[in-house]
């Protein structure tokens, strides 16, 4: 199947995301440096400033790709609590 690798990778990302839904985001996370995020997504993130990745996932209009990039950046910013 042409997309089998992409689907496998996406399923793995979904499983990791579910596990990390309560991961606390740093309050000073720089949303402007999220390369995958659109201007509209960045604006929503600045407005709502979600405290967890789960809260961010419930903001309408945020894509799964943006959420994954945000989680990866948050992990680089500081260790999980």
Image (cartoon, helix red, strand yellow):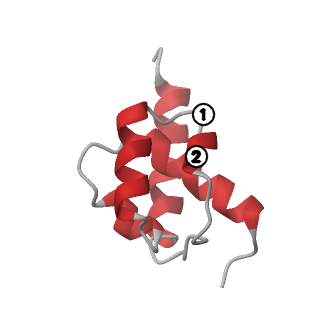
Residues at discs 1 and 2 in contact (Cβ within 8 Å): yes
| For residue 79, side relative to residue 53 (left or right) | right
**View extreme (top): residue:** 2
Please name whichever residue, 67 or 5, is drawn nearer the observer in this view of the structure: 67
Residue at x-position 56% and y-position 70%: 25
Residue at x-position 55% and y-position 28%: 5
Please name whichever residue, 8 or 23, is drawn nearer the observer in this view of the structure: 23
Q: Relative to 73, does residue 43 appear above or below in the rendering? A: above
Please name whichever residue, 31 or 58, is drawn nearer the observer in this view of the structure: 31
| Image quadrant in which you'd find residue 57 | bottom left
Q: Position of residue 76 (x, y in %)?
A: 76, 60
Q: Which mark is residue 22?
A: none
Q: Secondary structure at mark 2?
A: helix
Which numbered disc, 1 or 2, marks the residue closer to the eye? Answer: 1
Crowd class of label 2 (few under 14; some 14 to 19; many from 20; radius 10 Å):
some
Q: Earlier in the sequence, mark 1 or mark 2?
A: 1
**Which residue is denoted by mark 2 in the rendering?**
69
Give the CA distance from mark 1 to mark 2: 8 Å
Q: Secondary structure at mark 1?
A: loop
**Which image quadrant: the N terminus?**
top left
**Which residue is denoted by mark 1 in the rendering?**
35
| For residue 20, side relative to residue 28 (left or right) | left
């Amino acid at each position: 199947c042409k997309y089998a690798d992409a689907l496998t990778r996406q399923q793995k990302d979904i499983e990791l995301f579910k596990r990390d839904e309560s991961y606390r985001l740093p309050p000073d996370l720089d949303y402007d440096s999220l390369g995958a995020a659109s201007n509209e997504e960045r604006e929503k993130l600045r407005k709502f400033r979600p405290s967890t990745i789960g809260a961010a996932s419930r903001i309408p209009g945020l894509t799964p790709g943006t959420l994954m990039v945000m989680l990866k950046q948050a992990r680089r910013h500081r260790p999980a609590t």
